[in-house]
Amino acid sequence: MTIDPRNRAEAPQSAEPADAPPVVDRLIHIADLHFWRVVYNPLRLLNKRLLGNINVYLRRRHEFNMSAGAKIARAVAAMRIKTILFTGDFTSTALEEEFELAAGFLERLRQEGCEPIVLPGNHDVYTFESRRDQRFERYFGAYAPPNGYPAKVRLDGGAPVVLTPTVCPNLFSSKGRIEDSEIERTAELVNEASGPVVVAGHYPLLERTYSYQLAPNRRLRNAEALRRALGETGRTILYVCGHVHRFSYVQDERRPNLHHLSTGALFRHNHKERTTGEFAEIWVHPDRFSVFRHTLDTEWRRVAVQPQ
């Protein structure tokens, strides 16, 4: 695919500064696509999807512009960064139609030479019925670890990415869940790796940062236990998540080896910042990470971000 370098809206920049330390690997983080469909058949609304459908109709269909998918896919592929980490919420209410749209988006990226790595979000297991049907696994099994989560994958340069499960269906709330055994296995995978480690989950570990504050019904159960376990490894860790639809990059005040990155929703129209698209670019160095925020208004803007 040939991209005209003058067309900044189609080709975000990924230039390496002259004084940058060696780069082991690069990857892109994409969060919270939230492909949506409005449901009008009342027989399909006899569960939690009724609440979700109301939210889609009143808010999400105005806030998430799915028509931008093709343009953003071209822009991401044009960066020539092969690995794309998706931390879930491909859908809004776990409908088959929403999964089909999301699967088409990933297939477009795959055809452009990208390699997606996926985790489910809470909206991808929005109803108990969608979880029983293993809808996420059916549509995205080709991009997921063959033996489930937690799991470790290695990028081309050898940098490790540990994927940890944090989602479950709920009757009313949007809470996540991670079991003690999953926390223990996640820490084991981190300790087995060499160099800095990217750890990915859908939910943040911090209840609040400078850009978001999680309501009690949207938090991860056992988050503090996972945070403590990662901190106690002593490894240089970048914990990457979505869920909050806000960009945030902070160093853990109690566990300085642990940094927390949440990336804003890919298609979200952020009226406050006047942007219509967002993703993050991550560089893995031998001893640390570099993070760049990409946002789209009339053109793509790339900003190097330091942890707060």
Image: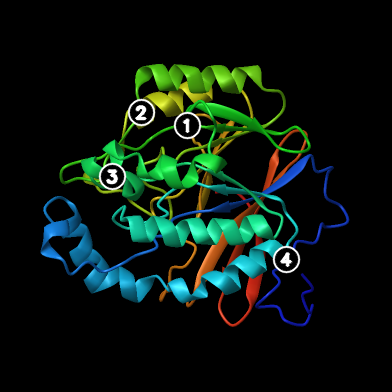
Question: Could you tell me if the residues under marks 1 and 2 are in contact, i.e. CB atoms within 8 Å?
Answer: yes
**Where does label 3 land, which residue?**
130
Q: Nearer the viewer, mark 4 or mark 2?
A: 4
Crowding near pointer 4: few (<14 within 10 Å), some, many (20+)?
A: many
Residue 299 on image: x %, y %: 63, 79
Q: Amino acid at mark 2?
A: Ile
Q: Secondary structure at mark 3?
A: helix
| Chain-order first, disc 4 or disc 2 | 4
Question: Could you tell me if the residues under marks 3 and 2 are in contact, i.e. CB atoms within 8 Å?
Answer: no
Is residue 18 in sight in this rendering?
A: yes
Q: Nearer the viewer, mark 3 or mark 4?
A: 3
Q: Secondary structure at mark 1?
A: loop
Q: Secondary structure at mark 2?
A: loop
**Where does label 2 land, which residue?**
178
Whole-number angstrom distance, CA of label 4 to CA of label 2: 36 Å
Whole-number angstrom distance, CA of label 3 to CA of label 2: 19 Å
Crowding near pointer 2: few (<14 within 10 Å), some, many (20+)?
A: some
**Where does label 1 land, which residue?**
164
Q: What is the quadrant of the N terminus in the image?
A: bottom right
In the rendered view, does 211 fall on the left or right side of 9?
left
